[in-house]
Amino acid sequence: MIGKAAYLPLVLMTAGFSEAAYAYVGPGAGLSLLGALWGLLLALGAALLFLVMWPLRRMRRRRKEQARAGEGASPAQGEAGPSGSEQQTGTEEPESVRARQVDE
C-alpha cells in the first residue's frame, strides 16, 4: 500500500508525462450535454424539494383542520352537508323554534 506522502509526487509525475488528448467537443454536442446535465440536476432538485415540502404541507393542513374544528366552521367545499332526515326543508320548523314552543 502506498503511503499518503507518496501520492503528491506520483500525481505530479503522472501529470507531467501526459500528452494532450486533442479531443474536441463541438458546440452542438456540448450544449446537448449541458442541457441534459441541467435537466437532471433540476429534476433531482425538484424531487428533493417535494420530499422536504410534503411533511410541511401535511402539518399545515392539520393545523387548518384543527382551527376549523375549533371554530365550528361549516363543512369545507366539496364535503357533504347534512343528509337524509337531518336535512331541513322549507316546510319544517327549525329545532330552535320547536324547543321554544315546548317551553311555553
Image (spheres, rainbow, N blue to C red):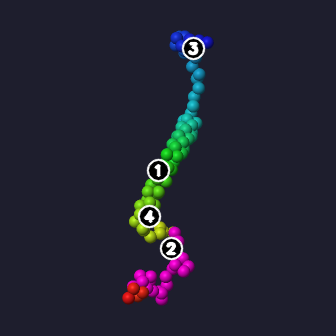
In the rendered structure, the answer to whether residue 94 lies left or right of residue 35 reads left
Q: CA distance from mark 4 to mark 3?
A: 71 Å
Q: Residues within 10 Å of mark 3 (few under 14, many from 20)?
A: few
Residue 66 in view of the camera: yes
Give residue 70's position: percent from left, percent from top. 41, 63
Please provide percent x and percent y for residue 20: 57, 19
* Contact, mark 1 vs mark 2 (Cβ under 8 Å): no
Q: Label 3 to label 2, Cα distance in Å?
A: 78 Å
Identify residue for label 1.
Answer: 56
Which label sits in the foreground, 1 or 4?
4
Towards the viewer: 71 or 15: 71
Q: Against 43, is 70 above or below?
A: below
Which numbered tag is attached to residue 81? 2
Q: Residue at x 54, y 80 (%)?
A: 85
- Amino acid type indicated by mark 3: Thr
Q: Which mark is residue 39?
A: none
- Mark 3, residue position: 14
- First to last magenta residue range: 79-100
Of marks 4 and 3, the one in the foreground: 4
Residue matched to label 4: 69
Q: Marks 1 and 4, how far apart in space?
A: 20 Å
Q: Nearer the viewer, residue 7 or 51?
A: 51
Q: For the C terminus, which image quadrant?
A: bottom left
Q: Amino acid at mark 2?
A: Gly
Residue 51 at what x, y percent from top left? 52, 46
Label 1 Cα crowd, 10 Å radius (few <14 / some 14-19 / many 20+): few
Instruction: Answer with mark 3 or mark 2, whichever residue precedes in sequence.
Output: 3
Nearer mark to the viewer, of 4 and 2: 4
